């Protein structure tokens, strides 16, 4: 059964007239009659009582009308949902990140959500080396990485450089210093992340190579927990500057450079080079590019 034939049948049933149905649908009466005859031929049943001048439905016609009205409602709902998707009144963007990357993307997410408040953004914590593969297999729309992926079929938007800084309480004795040495940092009461990472291993290796002590006294499972502990003046921490931008700006925390431990990283948002992407993903990419230009 064709949808336009069912629509013609519904209109005849509603108007109780082939001629009025034709006028309402802006079609000819013979075209409406042919549509109904096609349905009758396909079903093997008469849909209208031809002996009745009022366009009365047969029993088969009554049954078909019920299903046709349900199908019509579903069609309208589907068209509305697709229209909402196109207009970004629904849709979702999925981004693969590590914990520190969330803070880098929040300004972009804010800009995107201001323009498209009903679109959803989901950030999934994914191991950095798995992100390119998941972008390519469409588990993710985007991924934030700090290295050049070896996989083909990806493009990237550079988001800038991030570096490690020592975060301290504003009243810490070193808080007013522009920078300190690696050895000075190692002698502080250090609050560290207890999750192994390439940066953590790099810092520990640098201290080992210099035969310098590093006084890690507190290990916590999250960046937010570490920042909160520093705010409470329980110690200092070596964290990406971008994950504490708001706290530094509001003077809840002070940032002190440790040049030997900067470990700068190029931040990139990667996405698929080819293939269809959702309207929401296209809009998020545009928001990212606009944000980068405006930096």
Image (spheres, rainbow, N blue to C red):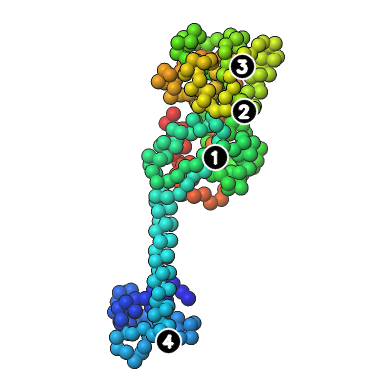
Q: Which of marks 3 and 4 is nearer the N terminus?
A: 4
Q: Mark 3 points at which residue?
A: 216
Give yes or no for contact between labels 3 and 2 (Cβ–Cβ under 8 Å): no
Q: Position of residue 241 (x, y in %)?
A: 51, 22
Q: Which mark is residue 195?
A: 2
In the displayed structure, would residue 274 be above or below residue 131? below
Q: Mark 4 points at which residue?
A: 46
Give yes or no for contact between labels 4 and 1 (Cβ–Cβ under 8 Å): no
From the viewer's side, name the closer residue of 145 and 252. Answer: 252
Q: Can residue 272 be seen in this view?
A: no
**Element type at marker 4?**
loop
In the displayed structure, would residue 91 be above or below residue 243? below
Badge 3: residue crowd in 10 Å (few <14, some 14–19, many ≥20)? some
**Element type at marker 3?**
strand
Q: Earlier in the sequence, mark 3 or mark 1?
A: 1
Q: Name the residue under label 1.
A: 124
The Cα atoms of the two marked residues, 3 and 1, are separated by 29 Å
Q: Earlier in the sequence, mark 3 or mark 2?
A: 2
Q: Which of marks 3 and 4 is in front?
A: 3
Badge 4: residue crowd in 10 Å (few <14, some 14–19, many ≥20)? some
Q: Earlier in the sequence, mark 4 or mark 2?
A: 4
Viewed as shown, does residue 207 lie left or right of 254? right
The Cα atoms of the two marked residues, 3 and 4, are separated by 85 Å
Q: What residue do we see at 60% from left, 9% from top? A: 187
């Amino acid at each position: 059964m064709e949808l336009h034939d069912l629509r013609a049948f519904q209109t005849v049933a509603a108007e109780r007239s082939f001629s009025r149905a034709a006028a309402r649908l802006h079609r000819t009466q013979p075209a409406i009659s042919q549509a109904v005859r096609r349905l009758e031929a396909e079903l093997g049943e008469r849909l209208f009582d031809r002996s009745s001048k009022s366009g009365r439905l047969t029993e088969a016609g009554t049954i078909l009308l019920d299903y046709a009205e349900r199908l019509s409602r579903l069609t309208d709902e589907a068209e509305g949902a697709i229209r909402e998707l196109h207009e970004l009144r629904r849709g979702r963007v999925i981004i693969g990140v590590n914990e520190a990357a969330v803070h880098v993307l929040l300004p972009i997410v804010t800009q995107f959500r201001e323009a498209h408040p009903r679109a959803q953004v989901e950030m999934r914590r994914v191991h950095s080396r798995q992100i390119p593969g998941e972008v390519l297999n469409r588990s993710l729309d985007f991924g934030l990485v700090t290295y050049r992926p070896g996989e083909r079929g990806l493009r990237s938007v550079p988001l800038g450089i991030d570096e490690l800084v020592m975060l301290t309480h504003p009243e810490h004795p070193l808080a007013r210093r522009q920078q300190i040495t690696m050895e000075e940092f190692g002698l502080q009461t250090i609050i560290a992340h207890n999750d192994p990472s390439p940066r953590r291993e790099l810092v520990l290796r640098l201290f080992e190579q210099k035969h310098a002590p590093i006084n890690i006294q507190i290990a916590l499972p999250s960046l937010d927990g570490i920042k909160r502990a520093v705010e409470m003046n329980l110690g200092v921490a070596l964290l990406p500057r971008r994950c504490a931008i708001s706290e530094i700006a509001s003077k809840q925390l002070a940032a002190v450079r440790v040049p030997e431990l900067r470990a700068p990283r190029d931040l990139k948002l990667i996405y698929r080079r080819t293939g269809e992407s959702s309207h929401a993903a296209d809009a998020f990419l545009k928001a990212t590019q606009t944000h980068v230009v405006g930096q």
